[in-house]
Amino acid sequence: MVDYLDPNKLEDTAAESLRRNLGQQAELEGRLVTLREQLDQLPEHAPAGERAALQLEMARALQILERGGEAWPLGHTAFGIFAAQRDWENAADACDILYQTGEPDSLV
């Protein structure tokens, strides 16, 4: 027996894809708001690594949203802190995000 495609039963995959993509973008935008609030609420004497971790997560979200111009300064600042603390894993993660932003200074 041969199954035939019924055009009336096909899903609108382009629309589904768009809906899913918009949902992911909205989720990332919400995450950015939360991260900004957490960063703003950090006390001045908070450990630099804690501040850098929040900046790195913000940079990651912005890079995924293709907002490299906003992501780059945050990622670069986080990289500097992680490198100074010899936290090489997070420093490498920051470098990856910086590279993915596609900004002119990403390879310097």
Image (cartoon, helix red, strand yellow):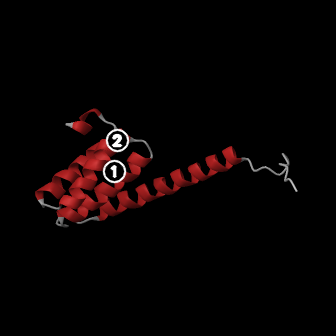
Left or right of 32 on screen, residue 72 = left
Left or right of 60 on screen, residue 6 = right
Pointer 1 residue: 59
Q: Amino acid at mark 2?
A: Thr
Q: Nearer the viewer, residue 2 or 11?
A: 2
Q: Say if 2 sits above or below 67 in the image.
A: below
Looking at the figure, which quarter contains the C terminus? top left
Outermost residue toward the front in this view: 1
Specify whether residue 49 is in view.
Answer: yes
Looking at the figure, which quarter contains the N terminus? bottom right
Q: Amino acid at mark 1?
A: Ala
Q: Quadrant of residue 48?
A: bottom left
Q: Say if 90 sits above or below 98 in the image.
A: below
Q: Residue at x 34, y 37 (%)?
A: 102
Q: Position of residue 40 (x, y in %)?
A: 31, 59
> Disc 2 to disc 1, how far (Cα)?
9 Å
Q: N-terminal of the two: label 2 or label 1? A: 1
Q: Secondary structure at mark 2?
A: helix
Q: Position of residue 7 (x, y in %)?
A: 84, 45
Pointer 2 residue: 101
Q: Are marks 2 and 1 in contact (CB under 8 Å)?
A: yes
